[in-house]
Image: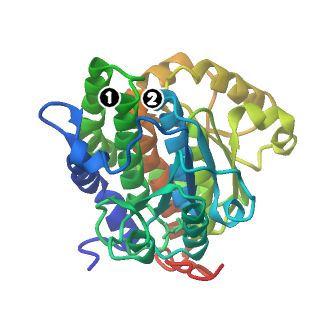
Amino acid sequence: DKGNHRHFMEKEIHEQPEVVSHALAHYVDLGNHTVDPAATGLIDFSSLRGLAISACGTAYLSGLIGKYWFERYARLPVEIDVASEFRYREIPLSADQAALFISQSGETADTLASLRYCREAGLKIGAVVNVKESTIARESDAIFPILAGPEIGVASTKAFTCQLTVLASLAIAAGRARGTISEAEEKQLIKSLAEMPRLMNAVLNTIEPQIEALARELSRYKDVLYLGRGTSYPLAMEGALKLKEISYIHAEGYAAGELKHGPIALIDENMPVIVIAPHDRFFEKTVSNMQEVAARGGKIIFVTDEKGAAASKLPTMATITLPNVAEIVSPMIYSLPIQLLAYHTAVFMGTDVDQPRNLAKSVTVE
Ligand code: F6R
């Protein structure tokens, strides 16, 4: 049932404040601002030498953001790859590592094959899944449900932000278990995560008219480039994936710093560049990349916050201004304009948003 929404994808985008709050409530104690040991302690992070993460598509991109968090907060080295490569790479693995497999459906063939490969190598296996009765869940030692509720739209939206919520909680738990973050830091991070539902609602209630107008314009282009740094880099790739799969506009996501190593040759007035740049410790660097785009006549769609919008004087095709948010929640909050822009562009193009051509919700072939 789509309720009063035109598509499941639209409904699922708007469900995010509610579902991320369910996911969060499962993994953290919102009264004391601590992680919940029962939910997060199914893997003993304290003595791990490393963590392997594998997944496909959007789930892989949530894992890539998770890597930044596990390395930063838990000082835990993360080996991550798309499942179709991971399983064939002959990665040296050992029983003092654990592995996480991220999958909405829990049935993705390559992800399951990577899981079996890691089990063979003696790793403790965790499944970050939406479907708790799935094969990937059944073959795991520990199940970390993302609690997104059924996701019907083929393009993953609420599963992505719920995966991020779970990974952020696990990274904080791992940081506490390993003594790499203090109790005070844990409280601060969880207080920031607790702000997510309110911030998501605020964003969803304000940006849609601007995004719709922008989507009408974007639907006239054939190629779009997304740039970001830090956790905004996987988000740039997620933005490009979402746009290409439902609107069929060619899009690429790049690390902002890679611009001058190739893609800058493509910059002209025919390829809008979407720059994802919260006012964080990477902001100045990203703005200097944006400058390089502007200097070559590139059209910029600047996705930033109030501080960022005030700090940059560069001309843009549009500036989407979000509230100032803590670094750990920015991937979840910035997912919203990214998803809505892809959604409304596809609606303007008249494509089958919930069931894009050639795609299936669950990919059970390798
Ligand atoms: C993109 C998308 C796909 C899936 C991928 C993995 O919007 O939906 O890229 O993320 O096929 O699927 P799961 O998470 O079910 O393993």
Residue 136 place in picture, x, y as percent: 45, 71
Residue at (43, 36) in percent of width and height:
330
Q: Is mark 1 within 8 Å of ligand 1?
A: no
Q: Is residue 20 above or below residue 322?
A: below
Residue at (50, 60) in percent of width and height:
101
Residue 214 visible in the snapshot? no
Residue at (14, 30) in percent of width and height:
32
Q: Secondary structure at mark 2?
A: helix
Are dots 1 and 2 in contact, CB under 8 Å? yes
Residue 69 place in picture, x, y as percent: 48, 35
Read off the residue under disc 1. 189
Q: In the image, which is nearer the foreground, mark 1 or mark 2?
A: 2
Q: Residues within 10 Å of mark 1 (few under 14, many from 20)?
A: many
- Scheme of image coloration: rainbow
Amino acid at dot 2:
Tyr
Decide which of 242, 163 is in the foreground and name it.
163
Q: Is residue 305 above or below residue 153?
A: above
- The answer for how far apart the CA atoms under marks 1 and 2 are is 10 Å
Read off the residue under disc 2. 73
Decide which of 295, 127 is in the foreground and name it.
127
For the C terminus, the quadrant is: bottom right
Decide which of 200, 271 is in the foreground and name it.
200
Residue 308 visible in the snapshot? yes
Would you say 210 lies left or right of 16 here?
Answer: right
Q: Secondary structure at mark 1?
A: helix
Amino acid at dot 1:
Leu
Q: Residue furthest left?
A: 31
- Tag shown at residue 270: none
Q: Is mark 2 within 8 Å of ligand 1?
A: no
Label 1 or label 2, whichever comes before in sequence order: 2
